[in-house]
Image (cartoon, rainbow, N blue to C red):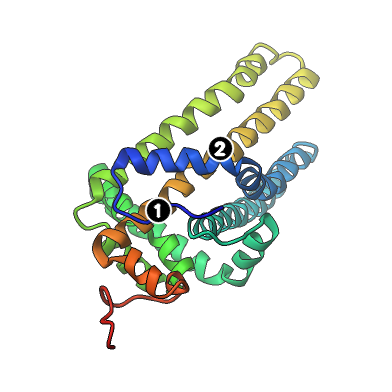
Amino acid sequence: MTGLELRPLSLGEILDRTFTLYRRYFLLFLGISAIPQLLVLAFQLVQDEFPQTGALNLVMLAVLMIISLLSYLFAQGGTILAVSELYLARPTSMADSLRRVWNDLGSLFGVVMLNGLAIAGASILLVIPGIYVACRLLVCVPAALIEQRGPRESLSRSFDLTRDNAGRAFVIMVLAVVLTWGAQILLALPFVIASASSLRDPSALRLWAALTQVGSSVATALVRPILLIATSIFYYDLRVRKEAFDLQFMLNPDAPNVPRTGNLPSIIS
């Protein structure tokens, strides 16, 4: 890939580049999203075979939450790192992207947890403040992974970059929610309806429940990369607009991996 032109983009252009990258590197992004999700699906299917007891259910639920969180972290981090490399005309692969996430897993966990707490805290006030904070923190993970920033610094960085751009972030998030629900309705809801008609047949009920989990996992693996690709492109667009990152990159191709504390550097600095 020769890289995509670094310049300020309209919201339509961000979305167009998102679907162009996803279509062009479909197997790469699907693999990064699906491999971690397969672990979640496998555990869910195995979990259904265990006897339903109170203590065991609590243990299984805790393990499922841990596996789901790890799956989310690897899929999110791997996709964002892959987009960054492709966007700037650098080679990448599924294995390389996921391996890099492993190296930054602790920091990524801190960013995601702090992000979640910030959104939850704002949501306690009312739903709208929670949505606003989520929009302002949309690019905290790219800031953490690409610029190698810590959790608090990444959230602060996202707030700085998205100032006056919360509306565009909101549209990206709404699109992702709509696509996610659409995929779940298409791939999982039919099995949910079928299971409701098989309540008196335990074997059929288990089959439909398993198919529901498979359909939901497929929907997640297919749709999740769209939000992450759009988030990465949005992050670079904000840096181009606010920091002349396109000029920084021409002067120093390694710029995306170096934390930036100011705007365009002086040529004589």
* Quadrant the C terminus occupies: bottom left
The residue indicated by pointer 2 is 23
Image position of 235 (left or right of 201): left
- Residue ID at (29%, 52%): 8
Give the residue at the far bottom of this rendering: 269
Identify the element where label 1 is drawn.
loop
Quadrant of the rendered image containing residue 16: top left
| Residue 145 in picture, x, y percent from top left | 49, 67
Q: Is residue 105 visible?
A: yes
The residue indicated by pointer 1 is 5
Using the image, determine if residue 217 lies above or below residue 229. Answer: above
Using the image, determine if residue 73 lies above or below residue 177. Answer: below
Check disc 2 and give the amino acid type. Arg
- Residue ID at (36%, 73%): 153
- Residue ID at (75%, 43%): 42
Check disc 1 and give the amino acid type. Glu
Q: How many marks?
A: 2
Image position of 160 (left or right of 142): left
Badge 1 density bin: few <14, some 14–19, many ≥20, Cα 10 Å:
few
Quadrant of the rendered image containing residue 158: bottom left
- Residue ID at (53%, 44%): 225
Nearer to me, 243 or 58: 243
For the residues marked 2 and 1, what is the alpha-carbon distance in whole angstroms? 18 Å
| Residue 173 in picture, x, y percent from top left | 37, 41
Badge 2 density bin: few <14, some 14–19, many ≥20, Cα 10 Å:
few
Nearer to me, 147 or 44: 147
